Image (tube, grey):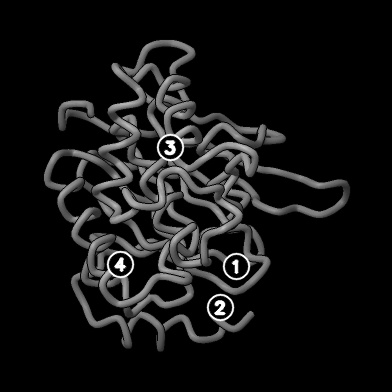
Amino acid sequence: MRPSEGPLLVAEHLSRNFGARHAIQDISLTLHPGETVVLAGPNGAGKTTLLRCLAGLSRPTSGTVRFPGAPTGDHRRQVGMVSHQTLFYDDLSLLDNLTFAAALHGVPRPAGAAARALADAGLAERSDESPRSLSRGLAQRATIARALLHEPSLLLLDEPFTGLDHEAQGRLGATVLAGAGQGRATLLVTHQVRDAWSLASRAILLRDGRVIADEPTSGDPDAFLARHADAQHG
């Protein structure tokens, strides 16, 4: 991870259009090391599109995403992402999937790193299985393990608590807090703002592809939700 000096990520005037539809519009956002930010908004607000642009998985129609201080062309190595799709190869075992991901990110001794990541996720006994054999919750745990393999400086989480049991949710929360202490920034998309509030230092609310609120989470989550009730429900 990067040292905790200066901004980690700077996004300026991001827009992403799909034909005539504006998924996100003129979004500027700065994330600093150690920040955990909750990203909320109704369905169709542009949350997933924003995460994909920040991760380098989707090219914005206009605007820029920069990682100040990171080597040129090293964008994706700064990011670990958990999305709605696991993106695993079903014809490979879990261990082979994570080993491949570790090698792509330049992790030393990728097979050993993959085995440790699965053990930390409580999946060591499932390492030889195909991802298709896993329940939704176990697949989510494996996806989170893969996102953390290369120790990214920015973690992008799209509804990460989906399918996780109470123990796994607690483990993920502890991981987010520990990462913040080490300088990692996390941007967490969730419909359950209250559940993520204690993890976060900021809350951002999107509606119709635009940022309509960006506030510290020092107050009560219910007060935040009440202030922006109309935007939350579209």
* Residue designated by label 1: 207
**Quadrant of res 32:** top left
Total tally of numbered discs in the picture: 4
* Residue designated by label 4: 168
**Mark 1 is on which residue type?**
Arg
Give the side of residue 172 with respect to residue 102, left or right: left
What residue is drawn where x is 50% and y is 48%? 129
The crowding category of the residue bearing disc 2, from other C-alpha atoms within 10 Å (few below 14, some 14 to 19, many at least 20), is some
What residue is drawn where x is 43% and y is 44%? 29
Q: Position of residue 208 (x, y in %)?
A: 66, 64
Q: Which quarter of the figure is the N terminus placed in?
A: top left
Element type where label 2 sits in the image: helix
**Mark 4 is on which residue type?**
Ala
The residue mark sitting in front, 1 or 3, is 3
| 143 over 59 or under it: above or below | below
Which numbered disc flags the more N-terminal residue, 2 or 1? 1
Residue 231 image label: 2
The crowding category of the residue bearing disc 4, from other C-alpha atoms within 10 Å (few below 14, some 14 to 19, many at least 20), is some
Which numbered disc flags the more N-terminal residue, 3 or 4? 3
Alpha carbon separation for disc pair 2 and 3: 42 Å
